[in-house]
Image (cartoon, coloured by chain):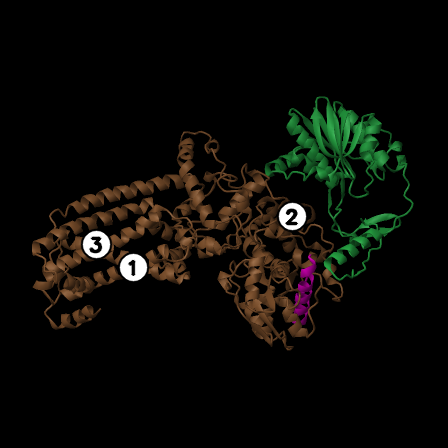
Amino acid sequence: MGASVFGLVTAFELDRTGATREIFFNVQQPWAVYVMLSVLTGLMVYGIGRHATLWAIGQPTPGLREQITKRLTHFVRLGLAQEKIRRDRYAGIMHWCIFSSIVVLTFVTAQVAIDDDLGLHFLKGPYYLFFSFYGDLFGVVGLVGVGMALYRRYFDDFHRIRWAERLEDHLIIWGLGVILLSGFALETLRITADELHQHPDWAPWSFASYGLALGLDMFKFEEHQLLAAHTWVWWGHLVAAMGWLGLIVFTKLDHIFFAPINAYLLRTDSPGRLTKIENIEEREVFGVGQIQDFTWKQLFELDACVRCGRCTAVCPANIAGQPLSPMHLIQDLKLHLADVGPAVQKAGHEGHDVRAVSPLAMVGEVIKDETLWACRTCGACVQECPVMIEHVPTIVDMRRYLVMDEARVPATAQAALENLEQRGHPWRGTTFTRTTWMEGLGDVPIFDGSQEYLYWVGCSGSLVERNLPVTQSVFKLLREAGTSFGVLGQEETCNGDPARRLGNEYLYQILAQQLVETFKSKNVQRVITNCPHCFNTFKNEYPQFDGNFEVLHHTEFLAQALQGGKLKAAHPVASDVTYHDSCYLGRLNGVYDAPRQILDFIPGTNVTEMKRNMSRGLCCGAGGGNMWQEEVGARRVNHVRTEEAVETGATSVISNCPFCIQMFEDGIPAVQPQEEGRMRAFDIAELLDKAVFGEPAPRS
Amino acid sequence: MHLVICAKQIPDPETPPSAFKIDSNAVVPAAGISPVLSPFDAQAAEAALRLKESAGDTKVTVISMGKESAQAAIKQVLAMGADEGVLLNDDAFEGGDSYTTAKVLAAAIRKLGDVDAVFCGRQAADWDMGQVGLGIAEDLGWPCAIVAKDVQLDGSALVVQRVLTDGFETVKEPLPAVVTVSNELGDPRYPKLQQIMQAAKKTVTTWGTGDLGLDASGVGAAGSKLKLVGLAQPQSGGAVQIIEGETPEEQAQGLVQALRDARII
């Protein structure tokens, strides 16, 4: 660094106009570079072409020509500016070092070529010196990145990047190290042989190489020895660089191209929305049971995966030791595509039955049933993926195949689905009716179109014992705030969310269409829901059925009522609490602030966040229809999450979702076997109920 | 082979008891309770379909006596894999008992002609009488094995495992025969969507008294042998008894004693 400061100071005092160097200094066959580049280009075209023929066996991807501005924004922010990579700070710095170094040094190399081969000779004078400086600077930056990568790969405790390690991972990073170091070796040899003695005022601009050259100079090699070494290193550097570039289309390095493109292809609507199967009654195949039934975008993104393991590291199923790793799922599909893709493509081309090609069943053998069922649809994997892979829709597509095409459903999930079909709610064996919660609350207004809001109680809110008090609290708070609202009572039926998450799109569509009709016939405009799953369904999915309503979760409505002074939280509720973001309110719909604002309004309540919170929050374990499934694996997700809540030292865990509350209620006795001092789980409305009315929230 | 499944549509047995009221010896279900296929009949269908799969070249017909809405129960069994459906619908059938129901179903089975075996649920989950299967067998003069947990074909006979209180017994009955199936058989299959859609498109034949050659005076309320005398809603309540004891072993012994005293074990 001393050398560079010296260089900066002295350079401006000296005559700089003559500074330059002979390009391809000392090298006899510079044209060889272009031969190699042509071969490389050919290789890349071949490699990408090979990928493209595989993507092409997929189905059309709708909507890619819509929302161009948003797609371009994704391309720039997520693809080029790499916003998601920074969610892991170490990796963010490391990747930026390597990325910027490759970009700048490619630019440096290109300038050298243009300067010489087009005969422009612009690398002279002050720009040449600056060029020397930033070339060296980004060489150093690149080495820092490579050093960080090597440390993580070899010295960090068993790191997620080693969960699916391959030879190419070692080759790529060592190759990059060799290229950068040989680049410095070249510069050092050239400067020692030439600049150091002939233009000692220019040399310090290449600050790192200059420092090395000063060292090398002490050995007093003959000039011809230095030049001979320079030739060898030059060829070594060239071959390493070309070889490394050649790796791009055959290794995970292809993410250089595929990640930004995948950012463009990324969905522009809410991550909480699943795709609608159009004209479902006319189809012969409903889900995705074979690789060619995916859209080509779903096949494309398999190739973008770099096996970084971020998805798997945040996956609640994986954290609990259950049989799902989103990374391995994507990788298994990618290998399966490579295995059967060419044969499928050939069969399709020759007009044969493409369905008869694969010797393995994709769903069942390549991807196990229990893997698909373990998914919570919580979206953590999608949120973290730095190359914008959307795992959840792919998993749900295969679930659709299991349920609708194969009728292969775990018994408990099947019971929930049959219950939805026959009884319009998923809670088999409930002893409550949709009006039980109304007892003792006085007049409960039935929605007739004259009120402003429909208060949607939901199946859990009316049929599950633990959730009844929550419904009652929300009701009392709405009434207290002077809200114009009504409920549907006996006329409520499930909006279909569990069916859709469990893969029964057909049943979902029947339920959704019925309810959209009911809402329209009753002139429903605005809906307040108890349950984030109902909230997500109405808000993000009903527009697919021409049902456009203004939808608020009760936390949003209550936060507004407190801010507008319609509710006064006058009674202190002395407690240490921690707040759990439900996935369907938080990560999938971005509502993080409203519930925390409510907690701020409640006097005496002290909030400690869990180690995983907000967009990094961990699912309670119930999402994706897992409320109605037996968990398979080492641990239960709700026990893991309950432990995290207990670690905060809080006496209550507060959430906003009937499933989360049930999961905590189930997890707490397992984590805290002693009844004394046990944590309790409440909905935020129950807490606010205490603060507004000054009475203990009703609790069974 | 030709198998027949008898399926009954009943008010949802999982409806909370509080949703029902009794009005002058008739049960009045609350609004919004959906009619469903009696769960034991779904198991009967499962047993017949398993037999169809193992025997091959078998036709399965589902018949139901009930109102027009019972089409839904028939369609559900068709979706599971039955080939044809027949609805026995006639105003004259209303208000009958197990005797008249068995009579009507037996007439339909006779009309179908070439039936080899009849599968019923062990009982309908609304009135829980468990008589219709036996009644059909009596009417047709066929053997009947009740409360089956497994049914296999052995030449021209059925080998049936029957559930007993302390185990099971295996019986063999020559075809044609009747079997009533219990829940121990296992969960009924979940139909594929393709099958649900095919079932939705199938036409269900409807037969009335005329088609079956029955006299209206011998069926329904007119032909019933059973007279309903009274109905009462059971009172439910709870009480807590704390079992004392120095050690967990003592507490467990106390609990066992209390359960014995209450004749629960």
Quarter the N terminus of chain A occupies: bottom left
Q: Earlier in the sequence, mark 3 or mark 1?
A: 1
Query: Would you name the residue on which mark 2 appears?
Result: A416
The three-letter code of the residue at mark 1 reads: Ser
From the viewer's side, name the closer residue of A546 and A367: A367
- Residue A68 horizontal side relative to residue B212, left or right: left
Residue A653, position in %: x, y? Answer: 59, 66
| Mark 3 burial class by Cα count in 10 Å: few <14, some 14-19, many 20+ | many
User: The disc labelled 2 sits on which kind of residue?
Assistant: Ala
Tell me where the magenta segment starts and ends, as one range.
Answer: A464-488
Q: Chain of mark 2?
A: A
Secondary structure beneath dot 1 equals: helix
Q: Tell me, yes or no, whether the highlighted magenta stretch contains residue A481.
A: yes
The alpha-carbon separation of the residues under discs 2 and 1 comes to 52 Å
> Chain letter of disc 1?
A
Whether residue B213 is visible here, answered yes or no, is no
Residue A554 is drawn in which quadrant?
bottom right
Where is residue A22? Give x, y as percent: 11, 56
Query: Which color is chain A depicted in?
Result: brown
Q: Nearer the viewer, mark 3 or mark 2?
A: 3
What color does chain B have in the rendering?
Answer: green
Is there CB contact under 8 Å for labels 3 and 2?
no
Tell me the SS state at disc 2. helix
Q: Which residue is mark 1?
A: A100
